Each structure stands twice: as C-alpha cells, then as structure tokens.
Image: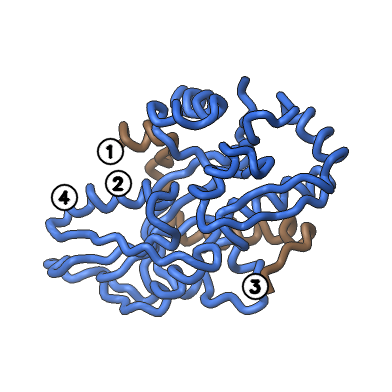
Amino acid sequence: MRERFKAIGVTIPAAERRTPEYLTKFVPAEIARWAGPIKASGVSED
Amino acid sequence: MNRTMIAAALACALVAPAGAQTPAPNWPTRPITMVVPFGAGGPIDLVGRLLAQRLSEMLGQQVIIENVGGAGGMTGAARVAKGAPDGSVFLFGNQGTHTFSQMLYKKPLYNAVTDFAPVTLVVTNAKLLVTRKDFPAQTLGEFIAYAKANQAKMQYGSAGAGSATHVTCVLLNNAIGVDITHVPYRGTGPAMQDIIAGRIDYLCDVIRRRCRRCGRIPSRCWHCCRRSAAR
C-alpha cells in the first residue's frame, strides 16, 4: 500500500500524525490557519 | 519543460460521525460505508479506493465506497455528519470538506470540528499549478508577469465552486493580485481534459497520477510525478 501511495504521489504522514488525537487538534488548527487568507481573498459561495 | 510547481500541502483524513464510540469487540459485523465526497476517478477517490481495499482485507468486512459529490465535497460530508455513530459509516474528507467549507459559507451544513469523530490523517499531497501546454510562461515568475498583463482574457479551471482546487487558485490569484475568470467543472478530471485541449489556461491540481499514465498527459505532469516520487 505504501508503494501504491508513493506511485500516486501522495505522502503518508509520520506515525505521530496518524492518530485521532492529532486530527482532533489538526482540523481546528487548519481552519484557523486558512481563515485569514480566505477572508482576505473575498471568496464566498453564499 | 516543467511548468508545474508545488504550491501548498493538502491533507486527506478519515473521520466518523460525532459521538462514535469505541467499537464493540466484534466490530465490524457488517459492511462499512466510506463516503468519498467527490466523483469517481478523481484524486480523492483514487486514494480512498486503495485505502478501502486494504481496510477490507484487514477488517474482514467489505468497505464500500460511496461517491457523493457536490458543493465542493460538503454534500457527502454532511451525509456522514448526520449518519449513525455506530462505526458503519466514515468520511474520507479533505481540506475542502473540513477547512474551506467552514469559511466559504455563512451557514455550513455541519461543524467540521464538533460533528465528526476524528480517526486519522491518511495522506498529505502537494498542489500543483498546471498550465495548458502552449502557455507562454516557463517559470512562476513568468506566469505571474503574464497573468498580470493578460488577466482579462485568461481562465482557470477547478473541480467545482468551493472545492479545494478552486480556493487554491483564488488564494494564488489574490497573492498575485489578479482577477481571472473561474470555470468550474464537475471534478478535476474534466478540467484536466480542457487543460490538455488548451481551452483553459491553468488549474490548481493535486498530484495524483501514476507516472506511467502521465505519458498521455502533458509532459509537465510527467516531470511533477518524477519529482514527487523522488521526495
């Protein structure tokens, strides 16, 4: 499976990033990270 | 000539409906649904199918992919958010479903943090700026200069309004300071077809193709695949 992912070009994250605990923090962190640039761009689907 | 470049990282993650408990010792007792919130054959679908195949072997139950496209992935993600928290349904989400959707809509169909139980980050991949074959720029600097001078007549494609490929190009355009016409497609597959045909100028795609298949696509895709595999 690692070889097949590699062939596609995607990267498997390090083991410490493949846990529910990490994802619990990662999703809100990503939302916070992109809020500024997206707001600044003015893009909206409403 | 390589006209692609890595622009940003995109993550794909597996999540379940909120409230999902530690499964019973005999879980799974029946087939599991994994919702891919985009059309079949796209980059998310490709990785999701590989994952589902391996999970089926490991779990001893079939993991069935259900492609539920629409609204940049939000339609499929909303179905899982409202799904039964019993370990029978999962979402193969991405940056579009779990980050961008939360800011693009005043009232997103779900809360990406509280309506899901996180399972794991699955893969990360790079985004690429892909241009039509005869695009008159060889480097990012030349691309920026050309875009500034010709923005009124240029067009970029995406996998649909609100998709990660759309937002990435919006952020890129904003950083450059250009206003370029957006052409939404029903997935990156059809958008790529129009890039190859030269009908649109550029696309903010993700790496996704096996190198041996890139021979059919513009030479720059071949280059980007080789670079990625070498990382």
Q: CA distance from mark 1 to mark 2?
A: 7 Å
Which residue is found at the position 84% from the left and 48% from the top? B152
Q: Position of residue B51 (x, y in %)?
A: 30, 49
Q: Do the dots labelled 3 and 2 sit on one chain? A: yes
* Element under disc 1: loop
Q: Are marks 1 and 4 in contact (CB under 8 Å)?
A: no
Is tag 2's residue or tag 4's residue first in the polypeptide sequence?
2
Element on which disc 2 rests: helix
Three-letter amino acid code at the position of disc 4 = Glu
Q: Are marks 3 and 4 in contact (CB under 8 Å)?
A: no
Amino acid on which disc 1 is placed: Met
Indicate the quadrant where residue B118 lies. bottom left
Circles 1 and 3 on the same chain: no
Task: Measure the alpha-carbon separation of dots 3 and 4.
Answer: 39 Å
Q: Pointer 1: what residue? A: A1
Answer yes or no: is residue B151 visible. yes
Q: Earlier in the sequence, mark 3 or mark 4?
A: 4
Say whether mark 2 and mark 1 are on the same chain.
no
Per the image, the residue denoted by label 4 is B57
Label of residue B38 in the image: none
The numbered disc on residue B50 is: 2
